[in-house]
Amino acid sequence: MTLLELMIVVAIVGIIGLVAFPSYQEFVRESRRADGQGALMSFAGAMERHFTINDSYCGAGTTAEAACGAGATHKGSPTIFDTQAPVDGDDKYYDLTISAVTPTSFTLQATAINNQVGDRCGNMTITHTGARNAGDTDCWR
């Protein structure tokens, strides 16, 4: 094997690495995003269970229940569900919060943290009607 052949192999490996590594990073972000979306959907299910028991979405967060009067909204970390996603494991990539709640409606938000910051989808939300939103149109699948 000559030095020229070795240099060609190194160049080819470098080119493949330049193409493959960004694709790998996007794949990892997508899998973390799917975990965040799953946690957000489970959180919405927990809110529905809370509503079934209490006849109100109020009281599911850390803010005082009195702040959830007619027409008022309050925000906070959930008391009925985990505060970060993914729920299992040590590495967390999203903070889960109640971004708005009234007795008959809610909006939940997953805010990107750690290695998910800068993701094209940004923060993801889901409402009591099931409406889902994110920074890009194809983030929820």
Image (cartoon, rainbow, N blue to C red):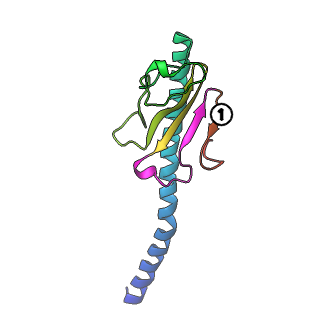
Region rendered in magenta = 113-128
Q: Residues within 10 Å of mark 1 (few under 14, many from 20)?
A: few
**Residue 71 quadrant:** top right
Relative vertical location of residue 57 with respect to residue 12 in this rendering, above or below: above
Residue 108 quadrant: top right
Q: Position of residue 8 (x, y in %)?
A: 45, 83
118 versus 98 height, above or below:
below
Q: Quadrant of residue 64?
A: top left
Q: Is residue 79 left or right of residue 56?
A: left
Inspect the magenta stretch and tell me whether residue 124 lies in it.
yes
Position of residue 2 in the picture relative to residue 101 (left or right): left
Kind of residue at disc 1: Ala
From the top left corner, tell me how far across and down residue 140 is, in percent.
61, 42
What is the quadrant of the C terminus in the image?
top right
Marks counted in the figure total: 1
Q: Nearer the viewer, residue 85 or 56?
A: 56
Residue 81, compared with residue 90, is above or below; it is above
Residue 59 in view, yes or no: no
Residue under numbered circle 1? 131
Residue 42 point in image, percent of width and height: 51, 28
- Which of these two is toward me, 118 or 56? 56
